[in-house]
Image: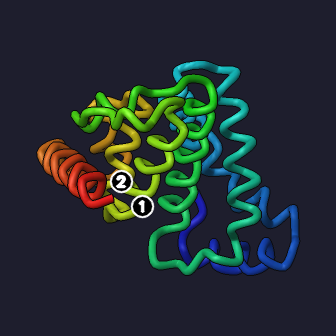
Amino acid sequence: MIDDASEAPLIDRARDGDARAFDELLRPHRDKLWGICVRVTRNHADAEDAVQDAMVAIWKGLPRFRGEAAFSTWTYRIAANAALGVVRRRREVPVAEIFDIEPDPGFEDGVAMHDEIQAALRTVPEDFRVALVLREYGSLTYEEIAEHQGIPVQTVKSRLNRARAAVRAALAVT
């Protein structure tokens, strides 16, 4: 495993376009990235797509990596988001049921409602939003979310309740 001190030069070299440094930087994280993607997608082919999407997103996102979180945490979040993107493309979740809201009769095709919910999700603090997306779109258990976010299960439940309430409140305003 690479420590933080040896990661920093690799990050700098990868930011400068060094593909070998990028490969070396990600090598110790590949199994965990794969595990996250398989767990979220629950399908090996989809997980492969998600890992590829994550690798591209990590490469493109390196210039924006600020080092406020550990590199591994940052990459795992990107992998989870990539896997969730694959799941979303695969199936549409009945979002009205997730947030216990009545669909507006004006939302005939669901696209407008989807846009409203996406806008409402953007108002939720990131840690709460990630927990909610992992639960509702990724179908992860409370325990899996707790492990992913490095928090106790009770905190996951609290974040989910607050995230749902924030989304419902944002939808009531819009």
**Which residue appears at 42% of the width and 38% of the height?**
106
Q: State whether residue 22 is above or below residue 69.
A: above
Name which residue type carries label 1: Arg
Does residue 42 appear to the left or right of 151 in the view shown? right
How are the residues colored?
rainbow
Indicate the amino acid at tag 2.
Arg
Q: Is residue 24 above or below residue 80?
A: below
Mark 2 Cα within 10 Å, few/some/many (few <14, many 20+)? Answer: many
Whether residue 169 appears in this view of the structure is: yes
Residue under label 2, please give it: 129
Q: Which residue is mark 1?
A: 122
Residue 151 shows in this picture: no
Q: Quadrant of the N terminus?
A: bottom right
The answer to the question of whether label 1 and label 2 lie on touching residues, with beta carbons closer than 8 A, is yes
Q: Which residue corresponds to the image point at 52% horizontal and 26% vertical from the top-left? A: 92
Residue 173 falls in image quadrant: bottom left
Q: Does residue 134 sit above or below 128 in this rendering?
A: above
Secondary structure type for disc 2: helix
Of the pair 101 and 121, the residue shown nearer to us: 101
Residue at position x 22%, y 34% from top? Answer: 100
Q: Tell me which residue sits at (52%, 51%) in the image.
A: 76
Classed neighbour count for the residue bearing mark 1: other residues with Cα under 10 Å, few (<14), some (14–19), many (≥20) = few
Residue 104 position, x and y percent, is 34, 37
Front residue (pair 166, 34): 166
Whole-percent x and y of residue 11? 70, 74
